[in-house]
Amino acid sequence: MAQTVPLGDGFDVSPLGFGGMALTPVYGEVDPAEALETLHHAVDSGVSFIDTADIYGGGSNEELISRLLKERRHEVQLATKFGLVGTPSDGYTDIRGDAAYVRQAVDRSLQRLGTDVIDLYYMHRRDLRVPIGETVEAMAELVQQGKVRHLGLSEVTAQELEEACSVHPIAAVQSEWSIWSRDVERNVVPAAAALGVGFVPYSPLGRGFLTGTVDASALGSNDFRRKIPRFAPDAADANQAVVDTVQAVAEQLGATPAQVALAWLLAQGKRLELPVVPIPGTRKSARIDENLGALALELTPAQLEALDAASAAVVGSRSADPNWVSQGRE
């Protein structure tokens, strides 16, 4: 495994990251002891880019990660986010990007995380009431104060990214990107490549759907995916076709569907000429080992063509509210 991958603004991270949201009760209940064990295994395995947010578990995810940082802060590239008010499972009540909230949010995150600096601080979602330049100016002040090392943006449009970069260097954009969520390739990805900004795809396994292990009809009542249109019964049935293609490619390579989905994203980074570091989340240590296998997987041109064709037939929006993500504002 390569030691690091350069995103933007001189920020180097492990070739795969770890998405911490999976370690909160978003997709069902979580065992805190197993969650901490999974985090330690990630770092033991070289997955040192750990991603969280202040609203995951109402702050409990940052508190969980603080237990890892207490022993291994120097081994971790730490990312967290601000801006959303509420929780993924209970719903969000507001988005805030005003300067006062930025200053308040970072101090709360630092306290929960038990650290004096955040390596990468993201604006989680766009507050349309506040010019993005004002939000980024407030974030830049945190860099000057030594509370934050690098800045990131989540689910921004190409224009918003360009405006932000005119205020302060941006290390990374984090948006949903996978075989079944490719809208960012139209505008956001080319803008990031042109501006020297790295890309951190969240939900690179399609919130688990691309692995072939998710039965959309059997999701629990508190499962966040029940709110997403493409998980609705009719859409999920239609979208099984893309899963079938991923599974077929996996069988050809003697790999798993998760490895194929991650390898496809890494190949897209090369094709589109920008650094790409996916952040799959999991509750089980064995899945980390499986995901790392994607780094050595080479997809053939024919396999890439088959996956591209399958992705074009996906049905349903990737978000309950399209304006919530960049797709709805482009």
Image (spheres, helix red, strand yellow):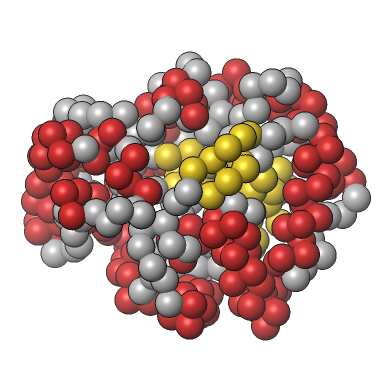
Q: In this view, does 215 lie above or below 116?
A: above
Q: Is residue 66 left or right of residue 242?
A: right
Determine whether, in the image, residue 255 is placed left or right of residue 124: left
Position in image of residue 273 (x %, y %): 46, 35
Q: In which quarter of the image is the N terminus?
A: bottom left
Q: Is residue 182 depicted above or below 101 in this figure?
A: above
Between 133 and 267, the one lying in front of the other is 133
Q: In which quarter of the image is residue 159?
A: top right
In the image: residue 104, left or right of residue 314: right
Q: How many labels does the image show?
A: 0
Q: Is residue 195 visible?
A: no
| Foreground pick, 149 / 33 | 33
Residue 129 image position (x, y, % from top left): 69, 21
Judged from this view, the residue extending furthest toward the right is 145
From the viewer's perspective, is 78 left or right of 31?
right
| The quarter of the displayed image where residue 305 is located | top left
Residue 244: image location, x then y, percent? 10, 47
The quarter holding residue 134 reads: top right
Q: Can residue 219 be seen in this view?
A: yes
Residue 124 percent coordinates (x, y):
60, 41
- Residue 141 against residue 54 in the figure, above or below: above
Residue sitting at x 49%, y 43%: 91
Q: Residue at x 62, y 43 (%)?
A: 85
**Residue occupying the point 47% across, 63% down:** 24
For the point 34% across and 40% down, which residue is it? Answer: 227
